Image (cartoon, rainbow, N blue to C red):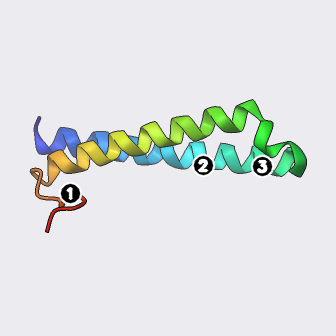
Amino acid sequence: MQESVVKEKIEKLEVRRASLKKKRQEILETVDKTLVAKDKNLKRLKKRLRRVHQKKSRLSGMLDGGKKAVKGED
């Protein structure tokens, strides 16, 4: 992939992640504290946030040319 395309995708993912975090915060404010662990919407948002973060990390790795240090590698 071209560098400009990867940067554009990363930027879109950052915007998406910010909107998901905002939505999560709104739900946390409305949900009762005792029901937070059982709330389906929060669980779904958590999964989406994780997927977006993983995709962004993969794209960042491509952008760096795989130069990022991998855990356990010195």
Which of pointers 2 and 3 lies earlier in the amino acid sequence? Answer: 2
Residue at which label 2 appears: 21
Residues packed near mark 3 inside 10 Å, few (<14), some (14 to 19) or many (20 plus):
some
Distance from the alpha carbon under mark 2 to that under mark 3:
10 Å
Q: What residue is disc 3 on?
A: 28
Q: Amino acid at mark 2?
A: Lys
Left or right placement of residue 30 versus residue 46 in this view: right
Give SS at disc 2: helix
Taking the spot 68% from the left edge, 45% from the top edge, the residue there is: 24
Q: Looking at the image, is mark 1 or mark 3 earlier in the sequence?
A: 3
Q: How many marks?
A: 3
Q: Nearer the viewer, residue 67 or 16?
A: 67
- Residue 18 position in % (x across, y down): 53, 49
- What amino acid type should be assigned to the residue bearing mark 1? Val
Dot 2, how many residues are within 10 Å of its Cα: few (below 14), some (14-19), or many (20+)? some
Q: Nearer the viewer, mark 1 or mark 2?
A: 1
Horizontal and vertical percent for residue 72?
Answer: 22, 61
Position of 68 with respect to 33 (left or right) is: left
Marks 1 and 2, how far apart at CA: 27 Å
Q: Say if mark 2 contacts mark 3, CB within 8 Å.
A: no
Q: Classify mark 1: helix, strand or loop.
A: loop
- The label nearer to you, 1 versus 3, is 1
Q: Residues within 10 Å of mark 1 (few under 14, many from 20)?
A: few
In the rendered image, which quarter is residue 2 located in? top left
Residue 71: percent from left, percent from top: 25, 59
Q: As displayed, is residue 40 above or below residue 25?
A: above
The residue where tag 1 is placed is 70
Q: Residue at x 24, y 50 (%)?
A: 60
